[in-house]
């Protein structure tokens, strides 16, 4: 299928070739051709022609007035010089004479014409189309050129079916590296892929992430701009503005004025210009007219060291120009070769007779000459490109040397097909004046770039080398001290949409570009990972972070331990309470038959003291790291013990009130109450009710050890789960009900005989209990930390101490220090006084 398509294309090209040659039948100028055993074609822009819009096809004449291209002239001479050196060499291609046919490709049509001419058979004007294209024998074995990517693409398409080796010296478009489409294309200039990578490293080196991007029309500029945009976006660089300079653009026209206005509007400090030399000159003429200054301009290799662009009037005021340029190398002897050529009166172009072939093997009408004084100067840019031509010629020669099996003295001359030479050129690896010449799999050279800066310190702009870019992998090395910035303090200009955020502040993107953002501090408990500057990430469960943090810190594990000062105080107080309870029980047992003990409840007092002691023992579960057993001891013993105490207190108060006030009025109920042991029954029922509540609490809402993370962001508090459980609240509510009942009964007995009037003591005890728990819940609402268990223990200890103090201490005082009040006569007198007072009412 491929051969058939190639044959069809070849047939069409043959027809076109016949048309082109039918107009010109004269022999070419000897200055542009040299006979030899093997002919190499050369395509060079000796003239620059801006083609007008045409209505009929035709080959553009290259000899228009004032169109001479000195740069192309130096490339032209570099090829002639290289072939002359090789022909004079005794080690490379000994006994083989290389010839050449050189063409002026001033336009697309001239380029196509030249390519077709090179494909034709020697001595004919026809392209040899055979069924087997590998047997085709065009007049040349290889082609050097052309210069730009657009025309190189056209030439490569024409030469590829015949696998004619084509080595370009300036076409850097990445598209030409596609071997399936351009199998015979090679080049001695690095691919734009490496240039784009070098430019990106240059931007990132100085932190320029907010840029504008301008390219020229055609493959070189448009593909370069596209590659830059794609890779810049991947590396976090934002393109604020992008545009293309058309072929037809003129400085100051409407298109360029709009472009300058848009460039000024986006306010980017850095502008990357990926353009051909012609378009770059038009662009900067427009920049000067628009007075766009104080910017950094990044130049592509096509115009980075172009003297034509550097000579634009007043360009020195636009800011700082940095660029990527082909590594500067010299073709030793080229300048002398050109001077000798002029002295031999072979300057090109020169006056020529009408009807002759001049300057490009194409028909010309009139040519002009230059002398040794007016010959073109060989500048830095032209020398770099000339070296690439020189290197391409030597690559062909070394490939041919291997193909012909040359020794140090002779070569085996024979027919050479282009595809055979292509295979050998791909394999070449040799030193050319300390420069290694070889090609990679894509036909690209292994070379490097110079990073240059324009220097206007002298009247004439110079291109100062400030660094280099090498690969693989791509690496940038820059000496920043060599750069003279346009800023007043010679500081590196900034080119950002938004300045970097402070540490721990996330970037909240505003609008379309991620480079434009506002800074928001990360909340407490979150941190900003450098890998994702836009999102605050939560810390791990065992970590914490303050507001605006870049990292998380381990939380401090805290627990209410035995060895803290407050623990010692609470331990001492609780132990003292236990000793008092035990001492009181012994005291009451010793004076069990005294009136004071009998009035306090007799043997019921031991149950009350025991319940308080049981609640007090549970307080030891608050110390140390919480375990299941400690969590079970913390609340339930207190809840049950204190409920038993309140039940006894309630029934004791109720009995006193009932005996003194209601027994005579309802004797039947009184006798039934006494006979059925109502007091004991009430205490048992009430205690069992609280016991059932506590058992349900412990089974359904079992207090368990837990790690609390919410109260303190930087702490992990080890505690139990009971404070918020329904079981705890139900047990607490039942204690509250008993407290109210006890207070009510004691209040009703406020006018009982003095020895039986316990309203004041009970009221004090219950008041102290209420205050303790109100203080506890208030503290829990405002404080959440490691000392919360101590607050809870203090509330329980206060309730137990208050109840003991209010009820038992007055009685202990009477027993120990007022035995005169602990007599039967004293209590009987008190009862008689109460009876008389009641009757008086």
Image: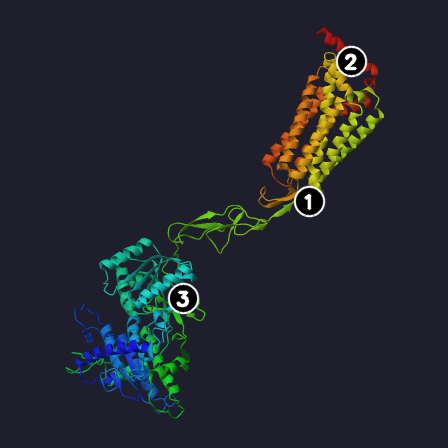
Query: Nearest the camera: 444 or 393?
Result: 444
**Left/right of residue 253 with respect to residue 710 in the rendered view:** left
Q: Compared to 326, does 770 lie above or below?
A: above
**Left/right of residue 289 with respect to residue 802 in the rendered view:** left
Q: Quadrant of residue 715?
A: top right
At a point 29% along the width and 68% down the height, the residue shown is 277
Q: Which residue is mark 1?
A: 625
Query: Nearest the camera: 751 or 350?
Result: 751
Mark with earlier residue (1, 2): 1
The single residue placed furthest to the left in the displayed view is 354
Whether the residues at callouts 3 and 1 have beta carbons within 8 Å, the answer is no
Q: Which residue is mark 3?
A: 197
Q: Secondary structure at mark 2?
A: helix
Query: Nearest the camera: 771 or 205?
Result: 771
Task: Answer few, some or many: residues within 10 Å of disc 3's Cα (few below 14, many 20 plus, some between 14 and 19).
Answer: many
Task: Answer few, some or many: residues within 10 Å of disc 2's Cα (few below 14, many 20 plus, some between 14 and 19).
Answer: some
- Tell me where residue 110 appears, x and y as whole percent: 23, 75
**Which quadrant: the N terminus?**
bottom left
């Amino acid at each position: 299928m491929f051969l058939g398509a190639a044959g069809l294309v070849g047939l069409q090209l043959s027809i076109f070739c016949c048309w082109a040659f039918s107009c010109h039948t004269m022999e070419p100028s000897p200055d542009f051709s040299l006979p030899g055993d093997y002919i190499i074609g050369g395509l060079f822009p000796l003239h620059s022609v801006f083609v007008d819009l045409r209505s009929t096809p035709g080959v553009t004449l290259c000899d228009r007035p004032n169109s001479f291209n000195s740069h192309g002239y130096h490339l032209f001479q570099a090829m002639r010089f290289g072939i002359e050196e090789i022909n004079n060499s005794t080690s490379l291609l000994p006994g083989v004479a290389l010839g050449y046919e050189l063409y002026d490709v001033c336009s697309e049509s001239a380029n196509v014409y030249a390519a077709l001419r090179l494909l034709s058979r020697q001595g004919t004007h026809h392209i040899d189309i055979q069924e087997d294209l590998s047997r085709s024998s065009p007049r040349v074995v290889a082609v050097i050129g052309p210069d730009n990517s657009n025309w190189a693409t056209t030439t490569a398409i024409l030469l590829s079916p015949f696998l004619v080796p084509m080595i370009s010296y300036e076409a850097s478009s990445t598209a030409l590296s596609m071997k399936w489409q351009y199998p015979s294309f090679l080049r001695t200039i690095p691919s734009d892929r490496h240039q784009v990578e070098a430019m990106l490293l240059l931007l990132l080196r100085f932190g320029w992430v907010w840029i504008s991007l301008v390219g020229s029309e055609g493959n070189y500029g448009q593909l370069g701009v596209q590659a830059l945009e794609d890779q810049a976006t991947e590396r976090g660089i934002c393109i604020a503005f992008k545009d293309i300079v058309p072929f037809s653009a003129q400085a100051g026209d409407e298109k360029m004025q709009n472009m300058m206005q848009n460039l000024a509007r986006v306010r980017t400090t850095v502008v990357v210009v990926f353009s051909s030399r012609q378009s770059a000159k038009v662009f900067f003429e427009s920049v000067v007219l628009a007075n766009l200054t104080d910017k950094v301009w990044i130049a592509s290799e096509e115009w980075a060291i172009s003297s034509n662009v550097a000579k634009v009037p007043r360009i020195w005021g636009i800011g700082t120009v940095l660029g990527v340029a082909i590594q500067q190398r010299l073709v030793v002897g080229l300048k002398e070769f050109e001077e000798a050529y002029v002295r031999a009166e072979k300057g090109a172009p020169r006056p020529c007779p009408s009807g002759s072939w001049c300057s490009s093997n194409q028909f010309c009408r009139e040519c002009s000459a230059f002398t040794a004084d007016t010959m073109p100067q060989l500048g830095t840019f032209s020398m770099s490109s000339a070296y690439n031509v020189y290197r391409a010629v030597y690559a062909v020669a070394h490939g041919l040397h291997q193909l012909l099996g040359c020794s140090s003295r002779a070569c085996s001359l024979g027919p050479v097909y282009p595809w055979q030479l292509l295979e050998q050129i791909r394999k070449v690896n040799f030193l050319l004046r300390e420069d290694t010449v070889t090609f990679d799999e894509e036909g690209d050279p292994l070379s490097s770039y110079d990073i240059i800066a324009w220097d206007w310190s002298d009247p004439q702009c110079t291109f100062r080398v400030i660094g280099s870019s090498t690969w693989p992998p791509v690496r940038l090395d820059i000496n920043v001290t060599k750069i003279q910035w346009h800023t007043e303090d010679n500081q590196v200009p900034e080119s950002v949409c938004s300045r970097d955020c402070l540490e721990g502040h996330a970037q909240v993107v505003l609008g379309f570009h991620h480079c434009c953002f506002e800074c928001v501090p990360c909340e407490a408990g979150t941190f900003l990972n450098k890998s994702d500057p836009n999102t605050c990430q939560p810390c791990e469960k065992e970590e914490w972070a303050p507001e605006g943090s870049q990292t998380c810190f381990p939380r401090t594990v805290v627990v209410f331990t035995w060895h803290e000062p407050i623990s010692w105080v609470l331990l001492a107080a609780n132990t003292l309470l236990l000793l008092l309870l035990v001492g009181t029980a012994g005291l009451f047992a010793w004076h069990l038959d005294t009136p004071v003990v009998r009035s306090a409840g007799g043997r019921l007092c031991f149950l009350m003291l025991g319940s308080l002691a049981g609640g007090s023992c549970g307080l030891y579960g608050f110390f140390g790291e919480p375990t299941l057993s400690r969590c079970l001891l913390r609340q339930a013993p207190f809840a049950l013990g204190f409920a038993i105490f309140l039940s006894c207190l309630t029934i004791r108060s109720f009995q006193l009130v009932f005996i003194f006030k209601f027994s005579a009025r309802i004797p039947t109920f009184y006798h039934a109450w006494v006979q059925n042991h109502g007091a004991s029954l009430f205490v048992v029922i009430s205690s069992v009710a609280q016991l059932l509540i506590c058992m349900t609490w412990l089974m359904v809402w079992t207090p368990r050890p837990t790690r609390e993370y919410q109260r303190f962001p930087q702490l992990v508090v080890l505690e139990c789960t009971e404070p918020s459980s329904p079981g705890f609240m139900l047990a607490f509510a039942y204690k509250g009900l008993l407290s109210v009942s006890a207070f009510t009964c004691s209040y009703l007995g406020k006018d009982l005989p003095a020895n039986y009037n316990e309203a004041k003591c009970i009221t004090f005890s219950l008041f102290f209990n209420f205050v303790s728990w109100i203080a506890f819940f208030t503290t829990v609402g405002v404080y959440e930390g490691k000392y919360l268990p101590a607050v809870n223990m203090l509330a329980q200890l206060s309730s137990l101490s208050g109840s003991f103090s209010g009820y038992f201490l007055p009685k202990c005082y009477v027993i120990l220090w007022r035995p005169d009040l602990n007599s039967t006569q004293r209590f009987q007198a008190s009862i008689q006084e109460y009876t008389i007072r009641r009757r008086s009412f």
